[in-house]
Structure formats: C-alpha cells, structure tokens
Amino acid sequence: MIAHSLESDLPPNSIQIGIFDEAEPLRAVSTWGAIGAEAVLAQCYPKAISLFYQSFDVITARQEGINYAAILQDHGVKVLMVRDLLAETLKPRPLRKDAVIAAMVGRAQAIQNQYDIHVEDSADLITMLVEQDIVRYGEEGALNLNQTLSVDPQFPLGNSLYGRDHMNVLCDTRVVSRMAKAIRRHEVDLYELVYQQHLAPHTTIIIPSGETFEGGDAYIHNGTVFVGVGTRTTLGAAVGIYQALKPQLEQCCLKFAVVEDEDPFGRSFSEQQDSMHLDTFSNPVGKREIAVCIEEARRRRIRFLNSFGDNLVINDGFGSFIDFLEQTEDNIVIIPQEEQKGFGCNFLLKGEDSSGRCVIFVPLRYNTDTNNQLRGLGKQVVHTDLFESTKGYGAAHCMTGQLLRSNI
C-alpha cells in the first residue's frame, strides 16, 4: 500500500475530509450529478460487461441525479457534483460538435452490432443528451466531457453515477479505489482530477496492482472499521488498508475487521451483483443500530486484524457477520431478501438534523417493510425516488461519495 499526502493549489473553500463513524452527521459528499450519454453507450453492452441490472431511461435518471443532489443540499449537506466539475476541470481541446456526436453514435452502433443488442433510439438519445450538456456546460465543455467519457476510454463510463465506489474516507485518510471490473477502472482517474482540485490536503492510500478495493466495501461503525471481502475487494487490499491505517486506528481506539465471503465466485453473476459490496446488504442506521439482510450476513464470516510487532494476526472465532451483530447491536433492522435485492439496504444515513431527529435518505418507496422499520426506530425517512438510477445496480449509498461526517 502506498500512502501519501494530497496537496495542490486549492481554493480557500476546499472541503475537509474525515469520517470516524457512519452515524455522525453527514456534512459533505460527492455525487456524479447529471448523468449523460455515457450511460446510453454502456447499455449497448451485455450485462456482464455493462454491469447494469437492466436498461434504463437515461433522461429520467439524469433528472434523478440532479434532484438527488438538491435533496442533500436542502438538508444541509455540501455536494460536489463531479460531472459538472469535471467539465470545468478537463484541459480544453478543439472538438467539433458533429464529429463528437458522430463518433458516439457510431460507437454505439458498432457495439450493438458486435453483441447483437438493440438499444432503442440510441442515436437520438445520444444527440439529445449532448445537446442538454451544451446547455449546461457550454459547447466547448460539453464536447470535451462527452469525448472523455464516451469516446476516448476503452469502455464508455456509464457506471460513473455510483460515486462511492471510487474511494472511501476512513478516519482522516482517503482510500483511492482500484476497481475490479474493466468498464469501471478509468472512472477513478477522472474523479481524482476533481478531488485534487476541491479537497483540502490529506493523506491517501493507493491500492497496488494485483489487489482490488471498491468504496462500497467499507464503513466505520461502533468503533470498528469493517471492510467487505468478496467479488470486488480482495483480502490483500483489506490487509494493506489496515497496515496503512494502523497508526490512526491506535490513536482513535478503532478495531479493524474483514467481513469475508469465503466463496465469492461460487454464485451466478446476478447473485454476485446483488451483494457485490458490504453496503448492498448492511448499513448502519445509528449508534449500535444497523440494517442487514440476514441471508447475506450469514454467508460471511467476520475476522479481526491485529498486529504483534511486525507480525499480522487475523483472529477467527467470531462466527458469521450476523452472529457478531446480534451480540453487539442494540437494534437490528432486518431487511427482507427481496427488498435487499431491490436496494432496500442501500440508503444513505444523514444522521441527526438540527432538531435531533435522525434523517435517512431512502432510494425507493416500494421497500415498504424496510422503510417502515426505519420509521419504527424513530428515523425520518426522506424519499429520493431513484427508480431509474437503481437499474444500474446501485442506489443512494452507492451514488454518494461521503467526504465528511462531524458532530461540529
């Protein structure tokens, strides 16, 4: 693992980072924002490449992303809309509108022909979304952005809307992800361009080649850093994060545990997708309170990492993840398996508002069992209505790169 300090010429309002507990009030985040034609092109691939649950209405998802950022801002959370900031950050280059659109439309058609997939009205959708970007960013910025997202990389970067996966803030350190899937790897570099311009100096951890880590596989809860190990995050990456964080863990009296699927690739692709990250089947809802899908948590064992001198010790004997939670939590919200598959667990905990009530942003209204249980614990449930956005295999928690949680 490589740890270094991120420093650059930053504006005076650059965002401080720091998360020491997922239940502390949320202060600052990143989201992708106004998704565009990159998601149309990604849908031209089969699911095993695109990673999308099903095809979705990108025009509607675009508005959902804009609305979601506005909801967070209305609740006092500072939001970096990464796609907007990327349009400002990219180095200008001379591009013609007709050439960029033709390249995108041609690529979409070529991919569909290669995989015998039909995306209805793909050419019209691409043109419409580029035109919307021109209104939003100006022609030069919009063309450069679309060239960068949909033409230049090996794969169009349609999964960029799931903004948690590119990094994770643990304590006052930011772990820069190394994605497991090819279609997602280049997204990290583009997010980093924005973070280098808008975050205050801080330490980062770089995942080395050969290991993978995605931001949805970690959170801090009840004095423990939990890292999921499975299809997207390797045990080697988790161990490296532990070793890099060790001084901070000792200083903050934090433990470090892996929540490991011992047979992550022994299920179908669809089943792997349903529970790809720790935050797809478990999510804190307060101090000593958590939501979890029992079937998924029973599949995973929990092991704690410790050091004795230069020796790493991985302690077993704690049983499954659900066994551990039943011993340590005051309240457990049981997420039905069908609602877990429908992103019922992938909500975003805002924490207490100025009135002292705990706010939770939920992605979908039809997860009624989950939402009603949250209300039963006294939580204020705020609907974000991310119906189209969730069809790409992620919801509110996956769409949000958390940067700062603080009681101050």
Image (spheres, grey):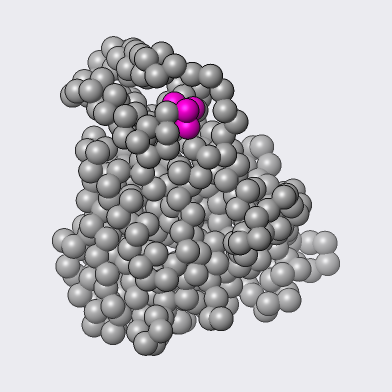
Q: Which residues are magenta?
A: 140-145
Which is the main secondary structure of the residues drawn in magenta?
A: helix
In the image, residue 178 above or below residue 218: above
Q: Is residue 290 left or right of residue 258?
A: left
* Residue at 55% from the left image edge and 67% from the top image edge: 404
The answer to whether residue 168 is seen in the rendering is yes
Is 140 positioned to the left or the right of 62 in the image?
A: right
Q: Is residue 273 visible?
A: no
Relative depth, front residue between 219 and 119: 119
* Residue toward you, 146 or 260: 146
Residue 1 counted in the magenta span: no
Task: Quadrant for residue 294, please give it.
Answer: bottom left
Q: Give percent across and percent down for residue 173.
A: 66, 61
Examine the rendered structure and indicate whether residue 130 appears above or below residue 290.
above
Residue drawn at x 32%, y 67% is 361
Q: Percent x, y for residue 162?
A: 41, 47
Residue under the point 36% across and 44% down: 34
